[in-house]
Each structure stands twice: as C-alpha cells, then as structure tokens.
Amino acid sequence: MKVVTVVGARPQFIKAAAVSRELRQRHQEVLVHTGQHYDYEMSGIFFDGLEMSPPELNLGVGSGSHAAQTGAMLKGIESVLLAEKPDCLLIYGDTNSTLAGALAAAKLSVPVAHVEAGLRSFNRRMPEEINRIVADRLSQLLLCPSETAMQNLAAEGQAGHAHLVGDVMLDVIEWAKQRLSSTPTGILAKLGLAERQYVLATVHRSENTDDLARLNQILAAFNALGETVVFPVHPRTRKLIDTAASKVASNVRLIEPVGYMQMVELSSAARQILTDSGGLQKEAYWLGVPCITMRDETEWVETVAAGWNTLVGADSQRILEASRTFRPNGTHPSLYGDGFAARKCVSLLGNGAHVEGQERAEKGN
C-alpha cells in the first residue's frame, strides 16, 4: 500500500513521527511537507529532534492569508497525488495543510484518513474548527484520540467510519521520555534554569496573537508574575509582540523556538505551563505539570475534567490568579490511550478500513 502523508506545522511533525515509524515498516510512505511552517526553526529542527525521515517532497508554500496559503497547498498536493497515485492520503489535526490535503484527495477520489479526528471546540470563529470539520466530512477513516471525539462524530452522523485509537502524541512523548532519561538535551543548564523554578509559556493561536488587546493582556500577566517566564516565541508572534503596547519585563525570557526533545525537557521541569496550544495541554498532563490554558474553550476537555488544566481566556487578572492558586486535585487518571495509537492507526489502514469507508460514502451510507 502506498500512502501520501501531508504535514505542514510543528504539531503535525510530532504526530507523524509516531505513525511514520510504524507505517514504513509495512507500507510505502511519501511524506509531503507543505512548507506552512517554512523556516528551519519552525520545522527542520523538529525533524531532527524526532529522528524521523525527512520529507520526500517540500512544497515550500510559506506564509500568507488563509485563502492564498490553502490555495497554493491545494495545487501542490493535487500534483503530488496525480504523480504518486497513492492508495490513501493521511492527514493530521486541523491546520490549513490538513484542509488542503483533504480537499485535494476528495476531488481526485483518493480515500482520506484523518488522525486526531472528531475534536470540536464548537467555536466557528476559529479557523482550526472549520478545518477539522471539513476534513472529517471528507475523510473515509476517522482516527479518534478520545471517547469525546467519538461522541462528537456520532452526533454528526459519522460513527460508521470512526475508530477510537488514542492519541499518537502519547506514543511520541513516551518515546521521548525514555531517551531523555539517558540522554538529556542540556537545555536547562544552557538557559540557567532550575527545576520547578520557572513557568513555561507559549502563545501562537490567532485569537490571541491577531487581537492586540488579548495579546497585551497576556503579556501584562507574564510581566506581573514575579518569576521567570520562559517563552519560546513563534516568529510571527515575535513580530506582533514588537508592535504590542505592553512591553516585555525582565522576568520574561523570549527565546527562539526549540526542538521537540528540548521542549519536552523544558515542559517536564517547569513549575507550571501557560499556553494556548492544544498539544501542550496534553503533554503537560502526561508529564504531570499543571496547565493554565489561555483560551475560552478547549477541545481537550478531559484534561480540565481531571483537574490538571484550567481555562482562563486572555484576561490578565484571571491568568495571574490561576498561576498563583491553581493546584491539581492529586488524582491523575490515564487519558488518551495506552501509547500504541500509531500501531492501531496503521493496522486499520492496512486492513482496508479507509477503502470500506470510501465504499460506504459512494453508496451514500
């Protein structure tokens, strides 16, 4: 079986690392990097850290408006599919790369398998929400990380081709923890940090970065925390910070993006994580680090229900209060599978579940 896999942003590289390792043992994979994150700090460094094969193809799309970026990806992916003639297209998550891959494959009648299907924020103002809804509707194999995702798809009439596999990011973080236990990256020493003596922060979602009022509120909270805030900054976010009214105080350390293994090491040693990232919410949970999510809703509701994640929006006072008072309740139930999600995804692909889904779709069932 030949599979074309489309990735384009940092979280997708993490997910693809787990699945590609399994997939390439049994099948042929053509890994396509759209270039959505196009500089080395935002993509190449992740391929290095994850010990995954470099992409066979890089479309080099780069940044742009949603329409321009998605259109360029759609054209490029269509050319790849016509040349490679795969049995299946594999997509991840909720980026513009995901949407473009699903659209290109659907128009060429190539079955689509969607890893991390069924997530819903129920906020249609989020570009990611639109992307994931459309991708799910166009996919013949829906690979879900949680029971909540399965329920969301059932409510939309898509239960027939949905499968609960767990979260492939758990596979990767378990792999990373084993390697770090014997070979740490040394990032804490490099930055002069001590365990549990800093807060790790990330901000990248457009709802927080494109709205300067929200971004200023978040930066004001970081400034007022009175402790070291380590903030790996997305290049686009750094540009916006430069134009924001709120200056960055001396306790806030803006650093360049780091590789996956370094990020896991920084996360595991932090006192607390402040983020708007979906992936980091889960990683914080698996690493046993309290998480404060600077969003108004989350797709990863299980982490909130378990008491290890709390939603604060972008209000500086709520962020400060949570950072100072939020404590997990002590229990830590297992969430998002058993660490073998990638193996289950590849088994379903190999068993022809995507073809069965395509046949059902053609029959209108």
Image: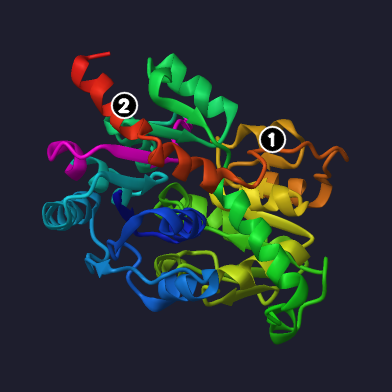
Tell whether position 117 is magenta.
yes
Q: Which residue is mark 2?
A: 356
Q: Which residue is mark 1?
A: 304
Tell whether position 188 is magenta.
no
In the image, what residue type sits under mark 1?
A: Val
Direction from residue 230 to residue 139 in the image, left or right: left
Asked if residue 209 can be seen in this view, the reply is no
Residue drawn at the location 71% of the way across and 63% of the way down: 177
Instruction: Give the number of marks.
Output: 2
| Residue neighbourhood size for the residue with mark 1, other residues' Cα within 10 Å, grouped as few (<14), some (14–19), many (≥20) | some
Please say which color scheme the image uses. Answer: rainbow
Magenta segment: 104-121
Question: Which image quadrant is residue 49 in?
Answer: bottom right
Could you say whether the residue bearing mark 2 is in a helix, strand or loop?
Answer: helix
Residue drawn at the location 29% of the way across and 32% of the way down: 355
Direction from residue 331 to residue 224 in the image, left or right: left
Could you say whether the residue bearing mark 1 is in a helix, strand or loop?
Answer: helix
- Given residues 10 and 230, the one toward you in this image is 10
